[in-house]
Amino acid sequence: MSATGRVAREASLSKLRLSIAIGDYDRNRPLLDGEVQIDGVDPVFMKLVPEEIFFRAFRHAEFDVCEASLSSFTIKTTQGTNPYIGVPAFVSRAFRHTGIFIRNDRGIERPEDLKGKRIGCGEYQLTANVWIRSLLEDDYGIGLSDITWVRGGVEQTGRTEKISLDLPSEIKVVPAPPDKTVNQMLVDGDVDGFIGPRSPSSFDARHPNVVRLFSDPTSAAADYYRRTKVFPIMHMIGARRTIVDRHPWLPAALLKAFEQSKRVALGRLNDTSATKITLPFVEEQLQAARSLMGEDFWSYGVDPNRHVLDMFLKTHHSQGLSSHRLSVDDLFHSTTLEAFKI
């Protein structure tokens, strides 16, 4: 082995070797590619889809560091069984007006018409579904007991809630038949609509009776943001508590690295010499986002997102998912709640 190789190997061995499971997003890619380093860490990255990360993390705690569903993280924290402590790097955010689908032959012309309907979902506790129920209740007066929620695998049968729930009796959640997916129920008319983070395949295949509730979800989401200043958070980062107990510097190091990675990604997006994503009108969309939401429209850290997190925790508790109301600071390691300044 060369002297250079020995030096590199010794440096690697002196670092903390951690498994890190995250999505392959532009804001994570500088980390995944090694362009951005995590102080003191020798990472083993796994690029996985959210459903796989969350299932493996909250069923078996397989990863040292991972992307985490905000809802699942909140449930496990209130139950006192969360193997992870939070880092406020919000690697997934989305307005969920795009996540409400209906059959167009059921007399549903506006959100209020969902009252009394049967609506399918993959899991009741999914973060996207928490935000969707929140906007339906806050903006359109649709209470939790106004809808029967039909839970099951969207494209594959056999899906269950990854975390056991103890919901209030007035909330009606019924299982899909064991031999039917929720998507097939939507096609067959066994449910009147669907909510979730992914569009059902019947919508993607342009089934004539499956459409979005909001015909212009972008305008609806922009109006929502103007009124609430809320850009919904979907996923955060979790670090294994037992490791953090031994290495309390780790959460702050992770937040720093994810911040740097996002900064690099946004810098590339600003470079208009060649479009960085395979989509037209990127410059116009970027300018529109900044005009509506400000320069730091995808912020990490607790302080700029406290109002978003507080709103989520309030509605999460009101929807019967958390046994008691958490404070924002309950989710995150104390070293990530403040930062040094020069």
Image: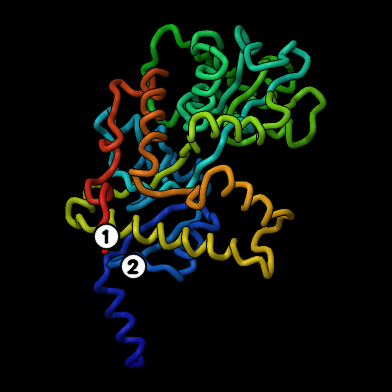
Please name whichever residue, 307 or 255, is drawn nearer the observer in this view of the structure. 307
Residue annotated with mark 1:
341
| Residue at 59%, 47% in the rendered image | 291
Please name whichever residue, 151 or 236, is drawn nearer the observer in this view of the structure. 236
Q: Alpha-carbon neighbours of circle 2 within 10 Å: few (<14), some, or many (≥20)? A: some
For the C terminus, which image quadrant?
A: bottom left
User: At which x and y percent is residue 205?
Assistant: 78, 35
What's under tag 2, amino acid-wise?
Asp
User: At which x and y percent is residue 332?
Assistant: 28, 43
The picture quadrant where one finds residue 330 is: top left
Q: Can you say whether 39 is above or below 173 in the image? A: below
SS under mark 1? loop
Residue annotated with mark 2:
42
User: At which x and y percent is residue 69?
Assistant: 43, 38
Q: Can you say whether 110 is above or below 3 in the image? A: above
- Name the residue furthest right: 208
Q: In the drawing, does residue 297 fall left or right of residue 332?
A: right
